[in-house]
Image (cartoon, rainbow, N blue to C red):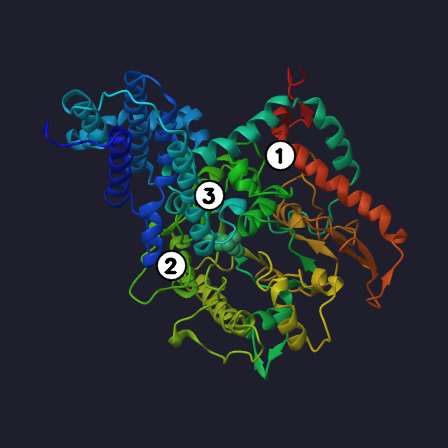
Amino acid sequence: MKSIKWPKHSFMILAIIATWIKTVIVYHTSFEMKIENAMQQFILFINPLSFLLFTYGLSLFFKSAKARNRYLITVSVILSIVLYGNVAFYRFYNDFITLPVLFQTSNFSDLGTSVAAIVEPWDVLYFVDVVILILANKFLPRMKDAFKVNIEFRRAFFVLAIAMTFLNLGLAETERPQLLTRSFDRELLVKNIGTYNYHLYDIYIQSKSSAQRALADGSELVEVNNYIRSNQAAVNPEMFGKYKGRNLIVVSMESLQNFVINNDMNGHEITPFLNSLTKDKDTYYFSNFYHQTGLGKTSDSEFIVENSLFGLGRGAVFFTHGGNTYNSMAERLGENGYFTNVMHPNNKSFWNRDMMYQSLKINKFYDIDSYTVEEGQAVNWGMKDVPFLEQSAALMKDMPQPFYSRLITLTNHYPFTLDPEDIMIPEYDSNSGTLNRYFQTVRYMDEALKDFFQQLKDQGVYDNSIIVMYGDHYGISENHNKAMAQYLGKDQITPMDNAMLQEVPLFIHIPGAGDGKEMTEISGQMDLRPTILHLLGVETSKDMQMGADLFSPEHEDFVVFRDGRFITDKYVYAGEACYDKATGEEIDVEPCQPYADRATMELENSDAIINGDLLRFYDEKTGNLKQDSVK
Ligand code: GP9
Ligand code: MN
C-alpha cells in the first residue's frame, strides 16, 4: 500500500465516486423506475453527480485535513440516511418522500407498526460508502494529509460542477419538457434530476407555500366570502335534487376539444358516439363550455371540478398545495353517503395524486395497480382507454352504492400515437403530425366511450347513475396554428380564435331524463361542482366555491381563464385586447374593462384561498369563520 502515490484530492474523489456509484446501484435495485430508452438510462446514471460535486466539493474550502475529512464523512452519512429513508419509504408507499409527508404523522403511524417488516439486515449496505470513507481515512496513508488547495483547481472544479448541472438539466429538458415548471411526478423528477436534487427542489416548493400559509389568517376570508356570496347563483328548484341518490360517474376526456364534435375530417366522422349524444334526449350537451386550466393540465381540471376554485398561475396546485384543507365535491358526497373514488391507470404519484386525494377526502384511488394490463393493452402514456374503461365498469359493479367515480382517460394524450390495430380513420394532411394524429386518437377515445356505456349497462349500473363527461384541456397548442387554420378553413388563427378554441365539450347524460338538449350558456369547468351537487340534491350555498349552477336561471354568460382571458356572450378578451365576438374585430377595450376587473378579482380571490390555505379557517356547516382563526 505504502508504495502507491495517492493524488492530493483522493479522499474527496473517493467520496464522490463511492456515493455516486452507490446511488446509481440503489436506483436500479431499490426503486422501480420505468426506463424507456438509452438516453433515460444515461440521465439516470449521471444525475447524482451535479449535487455530489457541489456538496463534496465544499470540502475544498477546508484548511485542516481533519475537518475536511470529517466534513466529507458527515455528508456521506447524511446522504446515506436520506437515500435509505427514501428506500424504506418506497418499500411501504411505492413513492418518494416529499416534505409534507414528514409532517403528516398519520402516515407514520402505519409505518411505525411495520418498521420490522421494512428493515432488513442487508440494509447496512446502503451505508457502504460511509464505511469505505471511514476505513480509507483510518488505514490509507496521505488521506489525512493537509495541503493548500490551489485556487485554479477549485475554480475548475466548480466550473465542472456547474457544467454537469447544465448538462443534466439540458438532457432532462429534452426528455421531459417543462419538467421543473410543471413538476408532474416525483418519479420523473428523481429520474431526471436525481434523488438529492429532487429533495432540494421539493424543499424549495414546499417552503415557499408554507411561508405564505404561515402569514395568512382567517380575516382574509371575510372579503373573499363577501365576494363569493354576492356572486352566487340561486338553484333551479325544478332540477335541485331531481336525481338524488344516483351514482355519479365523471369522465375526464383527455385533451378533447369541442371543435371535433359534430365535425368531420376529410369526410370521416371523428366522434360518432359523442355526436349521437348531442342529439340524445337523455343528454344535456353544453356547446359553449371552456376549460379553465393552467400548467397543471389534467390535475388542474380535477382541482377545478372538485373545488370550484382555480389552479395556480404557476406550477400545479396538486403539487404545491397538496396538503391544504379543501372542501371537495368528493368530501361533500362522502358526507351524503357516497363511496368516493378516482380511477386512473397511471402511477399514483403522478401529479402528486396520492397525496392530494387524501386532502380531497377521496375514499379510494384505483391507480395502475388496480388494473391488469395485458399484452397489447398499453400505448403511448399507458393503459389504453378501451380496457381501462371496461375494467372500471367491472369494478363499479362491486362498489357500495351510491358511489362517485371519477375516471381519467389517457390514450388521447400528446403525442397522440396508436397501435395500428386501433386506428379507425386516416391521418389528416396538414404540416402538423400532432394535429394529423389527434383526429385518430380522438376517434379511438370516442369508440372507447361508446363501449363504456355498453359496459355500464351490462354491469347493471347504468340506469341508476348520472354520467358527466368533459374535456380536460386543449390538445392542440398554439404551435399548430397553421395546421389548425387549414383544418378550420381560416386564413389564420387570431388571439380571439385561440381563446375560443379553449372550448371543450361537456355532456351531462342522465338515463331516463327525457328532456336533454343542447345548452348554449357560456360556462366553464368551475361550474361543474355546483351543477352536479345540485342535481344530486346537495346544497352548496355555504361552500367557498366560485362556480355557478349551469341550470340556474341566474347563471351568467361569462367564463374566466386561468391566464386572465375571458369570454362573454358578446366579447372575447385575449392578448390584452377586446374583441367583438360576432364580427371577430378588435374593438376598444372599454366594454371589456368591467369584466376584466372581475376576472382579476376572481383569480386573486381563488389564489388567496389556496396560498393562505384559508379553508382551514372556515366552517362550511355554519358558513362562519372558525373561532380563534384571526390572529
Ligand atoms: C397523467 C394524465 C395526463 O396521469 O392525467 O396528464 P396531463 O399531461 O394531461 O396533464
Ligand atoms: Mn390531460
Q: Amino acid at mark 3?
A: Arg
Looking at marks 1 and 3 on the same chain, the residue that comes earlier in the sequence is marked by 3
Mark-to-mark CA distance, 2 and 3: 21 Å
Disc 2: which residue: 391
The reply, left or right, for residue 26 in relation to residue 503 is left
Question: Can you give x and y, in whole percent of width and height, for residue 297 in the image?
Answer: 56, 51
Per the rendering, the mark at residue 475 is: none
Disc 1: which residue: 610
Few, some or many residues within 10 Å of mark 1 (<14, 14–19, 20+): many
Identity of the residue drawn at 69% across and 28% down: 623
Disc 3: which residue: 353
Question: Can you give x and y, in whole percent of width and height, for residue 236 in the image?
Answer: 74, 49
Q: Secondary structure at mark 1?
A: helix
Residue 407 appears in view:
no
Q: Secondary structure at mark 2?
A: helix
* Quadrant location, the C terminus: top right
Identity of the residue drawn at 15% across and 25% down: 140
Mark-to-mark CA distance, 2 and 1: 35 Å
Looking at marks 2 and 3 on the same chain, the residue that comes earlier in the sequence is marked by 3
The reply, left or right, for residue 230 in relation to residue 63 is right
Identity of the residue drawn at 41% across and 74% down: 422
Looking at marks 2 and 1 on the same chain, the residue that comes earlier in the sequence is marked by 2
Q: Amino acid at mark 1?
A: Ile
Instruction: Choose top left, top right, bottom left or bottom right for residue 135.
Output: top left
Instruction: Choose top left, top right, bottom left or bottom right for residue 617.
Output: top right
Q: Amino acid at mark 2?
A: Gln
Residue 310 appears in view:
yes
Question: Can you give x and y, in whole percent of width and height, for residue 12 in the image?
Answer: 29, 30
Tags 2 and 3 touching, CB below 8 Å:
no
